[in-house]
């Protein structure tokens, strides 16, 4: 029995890395020009904002919750930042405000769920629709644009996207905040309470812990990472279209589940989330290399979400048997 307990988690930890390697090899064989430096850079480019959203929502899912508003929260924050920029605000002030706006949305989610006791699905679904509409209202459904060049106004791109000579500096930025998220989840009180609430919230509350405070903080952290993702998204794509963002949350949620975080809460690792985010980016870029259009990407993303949830159910049943 002892040996089976040791082997189980090791096999589970290898599933996501193995899937990433297999998928990469598959697209190298069947995709066009997939095995190249430019394709690798494209994979990294599409990992930045998905990865940052995934880091944030890992905290939420570990508590047994969900946040469906992360995609529209990210896009609304980018829209409002672009609107401020178009009206003469300093670019760096706009970036700070983008993070602040997304963090406030996280606080609203946390308050609705922890204090007002709304189900996470319903609360964040409502906030998802509100943020999507609010960004369009403020900008009057006008597309917002960030600097696309690497001049003085576009200097932020060299930090959050890539340098003028093509080095993908955004990966450094993402890895820095990966370490921040990793430390928060593994080495701090908020991390310990996140796991504890996901395992048995009632027992944590009875033991004297203010679960309302800590659950709210979890959603605030998620909002903060959405704000960081909005900066990266703006630096990468520069054009922010009103009414978009709905559906982007599925990429982040799938990345988290593929990485081994359980939807039932109490289990999850930040390193697994990073691998899951890379896998989702490889899938997106690989499908494009095979000439498949956006609707195919949407289909396969949905399929990956279903398979990831089925894998989570299988892991839970196996753990219960052990």
Image: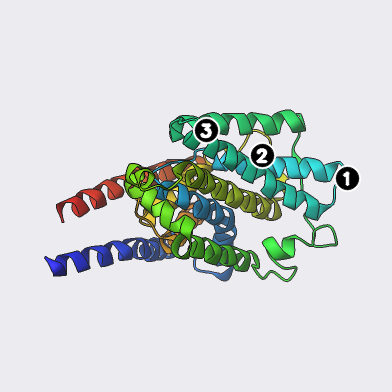
- If the image is split into quadrants, where does the C terminus sit? bottom left
The quadrant where residue 52 appears = bottom right
SS type, badge 2: helix
Instruction: Give the image's coloring scheme.
Output: rainbow
* Residue 293 showing in the rendered view: no
Sequence-wise first label, 2 or 3? 2
Q: Please, what secondary structure does the residue beneath circle 1 have?
A: loop
- The image shows residue 67, relative to residue 277, as above or below, that is above
Q: Residues within 10 Å of mark 1 (few under 14, many from 20)?
A: few
Disc 3 designates what residue? 112
Task: Indicate which disc residue 26 carries.
Answer: none
In this view, the residue farthest toward the front is: 208
Q: Earlier in the sequence, mark 1 or mark 3?
A: 1
| Residue under the image location 57 percent in, 56 percent down | 46
Residue position for label 2: 76
Total count of labels: 3
Between marks 2 and 3 in the image, the one whose residue lies nearer the viewer: 3
């Amino acid at each position: 029995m002892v040996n089976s307990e040791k082997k189980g988690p090791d096999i589970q930890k290898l599933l996501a890395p193995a899937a990433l390697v297999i998928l990469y090899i598959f697209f190298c064989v069947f995709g066009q020009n997939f095995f190249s430096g430019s394709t690798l850079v494209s994979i990294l480019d599409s990992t930045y904002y998905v990865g940052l959203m995934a880091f944030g929502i890992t905290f939420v899912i570990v508590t047994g919750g969900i946040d469906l508003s992360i995609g529209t929260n990210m896009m609304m924050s980018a829209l409002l930042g672009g609107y401020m920029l178009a009206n003469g605000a300093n670019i760096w002030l706009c970036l700070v405000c983008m993070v602040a706006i997304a963090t406030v949305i996280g606080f609203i989610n946390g308050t609705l769920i922890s204090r007002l006791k709304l189900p996470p699905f319903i609360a964040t679904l409502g906030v998802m629709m509100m943020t999507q509409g609010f960004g369009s209202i403020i900008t009057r459904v006008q597309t917002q644009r960030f600097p696309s060049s690497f001049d003085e106004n576009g200097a932020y791109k060299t930090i959050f996207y890539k340098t003028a000579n093509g080095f993908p500096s955004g990966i450094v930025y993402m890895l820095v905040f990966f370490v921040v998220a990793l430390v928060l989840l593994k080495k701090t009180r908020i991390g310990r309470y996140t796991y504890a609430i996901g395992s048995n919230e009632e027992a944590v509350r009875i033991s004297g812990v203010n679960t309302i405070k800590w659950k709210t903080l979890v959603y605030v952290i998620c909002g903060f990472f959405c704000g960081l993702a909005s900066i990266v998204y703006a630096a990468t794509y520069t054009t922010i279209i009103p009414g978009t963002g709905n559906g982007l949350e599925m990429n982040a949620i799938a990345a988290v589940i593929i990485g081994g975080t359980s939807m039932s809460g109490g289990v999850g690792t930040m390193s697994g989330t990073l691998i899951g985010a890379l896998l989702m980016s490889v899938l997106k870029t690989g499908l494009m290399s095979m000439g498949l259009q956006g609707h195919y990407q949407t289909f396969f993303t949905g399929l990956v979400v279903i398979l990831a949830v089925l894998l989570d159910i299988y892991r839970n049943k196996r753990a219960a048997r052990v």
